[in-house]
Image (tube, rainbow, N blue to C red):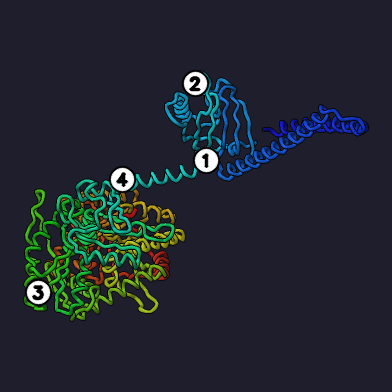
Amino acid sequence: MSEFAYMLIKITTTIIIIALFSLLSSTAAHAFSHVSNDVPIWLLVILGLLLCGITFLCWQLRKHKLAYQTLLLSEQRLKSTVAGSGDTLWDWNIRTGAVVRINDKFNRHERNGGYQTSTVASNLFIPNQQSIHPQDLPMVERLLKLHFAEKSAFFEASYRVLNDLNEWHWVLDKGKVIEKDENLNPLRMTGIVRDISHLKSTEERLNLFAKCVESISDAIAIYDSQFRLVDLNPSYLKLFGGIREQYLHKAFALPGYDAKFLEEIKFALKETEHWQEELKLRNATNTLLPIEVTIDEIKNNQGQVSNYVVVFSDLTERKKAESQLHDLSNRDRTTGLPNRNLFFTNLKKLSQQGTHHALLVFDLDNFKKINDSLGHQLGDSLLAKLAMRLVKIVRQQDTFYRLGGDEFALVMSGTNDIHTITRTAKQFLAAIATPFKLANHELVITSSVGIVLFPEDGNTPELLLKNADTAMYHAKQKSNHYLFFNDSMNEQAVKRLQIENLMRFGLKEDHFVVYYQPKMDIISGALVGMEALVRFITPKKGIIPPNVFIPIAEETGQIIEIGEVVLDKACQDVKSWIDAGLFEGRVAVNLSAKQFSLPDLTTRIDVILQKNQLPSYFLELEITEGTVMDDPQEAIAIMRSLSARGIHLAMDDFGTGYSSLAYLKQFPLNTLKVDKAFIDDMHNERGRNMVDSIVTIAHNLDLHVVAEGVEREEQLAFLKSLNCQTIQGYYYSKPLSYEEFTVFLKQQKRKPTLKVLHSDFA
């Protein structure tokens, strides 16, 4: 009953009661006014009936009031229950389309716990279809039609709806038709809608985790708190074979391991809640595999162990990869020999044992020439064949290593017997010197071997290798030779290291200076040029001779930087003398073999000339015979590039190496220098004939001839008889500093001489 109906009944009843009381009062008054007369029986009856009617109406009024209060209380409880549950109740009048909703949390205009009434257009089959996700609408319509057709006891669907923030939320909609017409067509339907977004999110996460467990490559088994199997993934069956049913409800076991070991695992789990170890287990094909077993506890909300998760990880591929990685990091790929890393590891272990052993270190002489001329691929093939050849020589207890490049080492363990060691060294040298046949080439190589003994020559791998390298360095002074390390070698190595450090510091602090030795015309005695000579002057050690530091600089590569310093300073000095009107000739600068092999040599020279604004006409580069003969064809290309820039080229030390007249005539040379060694030997006929031959060759090739190292009058006279054009040496002047040479130039300007011009210097 509605509140309005209740009020209407209450007002009507009150009016009737008032009317009855009025009637009763008037009747009673009339009766009492005629009290003396007899009261008729019918009047008393009427009065009684009126009293009964009044009493009945009062009782009915109270009854309706109590029912109404009960209804209000029930409705309030229903609202509170619905509001507390978070669900939305709905009542759908299918014929009219009216929908009543209670606690509609998806409607922005609805207060929580209140009513929402709406009318749905008659052409919409589903009352809330405008808020349902388009992808879910066909499914909702299908399920609703099934329920209308009485093919389902309830309508139940999970779908997405749009909330008041325009966000999609998952809901569970459940309802039932409660009223039908005479043709069994549904007239009214009621139900509830529940927000299940959080459940859907949890479900999606669970599905994701389930798929991960299903697809993971590791075998996974889940046990209950009593260690009985409750589930496993496909990878478990793939690893161990069988079917799922044969494992379910079985007790935890590790084939090959006894019950005592299993108890130790369970005890460890109680202590740490985690257990992990690498075991050997047999797979489906009965193959013993390395498998890492990991067990973890799973606890419920009360902190009690509910399950155990056991993961079986097959380590076969990982072990194989580790082995390959170990080989990559400890094996040389070209020769298959243990590499430098393993050399230090094993030698350190051997040194810790305290037993005697010997270390032989060697490299191949001039191996770079093979790589450069025949290619690195053939060079690698040579190293591989060499390793195969030498491995056959070593004793079973010895180990052969490739330290890098063409450097090898042999560790002879358990011996310091000199005869055994030297016999092995000789066998190595003989095997190396035996010709190799590769790609239609017969290659002959030699080696130098340095030998150290443990513990006499060092007690660490680093010190032993250092001393062996020192001994090898000294052995190189004699081709195809071996040497044992001694203290004097170490002293020389220390001095060599000191020179290296001094040069490094000297380059940084500008301790390299340039001196100049004049080149004089042999007929007129006039200055026609000079040679730039480097001097290394240190603050504490004084002057370090060129024959001491230059060989070391060539080995370390520092000669490149030193050469550029000399070239830069020479160009700078010559430019200043030209600007002062003191000089018109050329300055000769030596070009080392390492400089000559630089791929950007011509660019470097161009930069220095441009920096000092010196025309290339004033520069002459001296190249040694050995430098150009390493790779004649490449040398010709480089020399032509330099010559095209207007730079003059001179060949230094001609005749001291392995000259080739066939190549000499192809070199774009301007000058040929006669080495001081030949000039010094002119006191005998053989020496004079040698100089005569060199000068004759130069003239026949139309080259200018410069004799260096001329110190005596008789040498000058003989060279003049051979038509040698230019000389340099102490006969005229020692090498002079910049300041001294400036004075020399001024003296030459004041000195009257017969001016004889040669085409080379014109």
Give the number of the disc on residue 421. 3
- Horizontal and vertical percent for residue 165? 59, 39
Amino acid of disc 3: Ile
Which callout, 3 or 4, points to the residue nearer the camera? 4
| Cα separation between marks 3 and 4 | 61 Å
Q: Earlier in the sequence, mark 2 or mark 3?
A: 2
Please tell me whether mark 2 or mark 3 is closer to you in this view: 2
Q: Is residue 170 left or right of residue 42?
A: left
In the figure, residue 593 lies in which quadrant? bottom left
Q: Which residue has dot 1 on it?
A: 195
* Circle nearer the N terminus (4, 2): 2
Which secondary structure, mark 1?
A: strand
Asked if labels 4 and 3 touch by Cβ distance under 8 angstroms, the answer is no
Q: Which label lies toward us, 4 or 2?
A: 2
**Alpha carbon of mark 3 to alpha carbon of mark 1: how far?**
88 Å
Q: Residue at x 55, y 40 (%)?
A: 87
Which residue is labeled 4 in the image? 215
Taking 443 as reference, is 626 left or right? right
Q: Nearer the viewer, mark 3 or mark 1?
A: 1
The residue wearing badge 2 is 184
The mark nearer the N terminus, 2 or 1, is: 2
* In contact (CB < 8 Å): disc 4 and disc 2: no
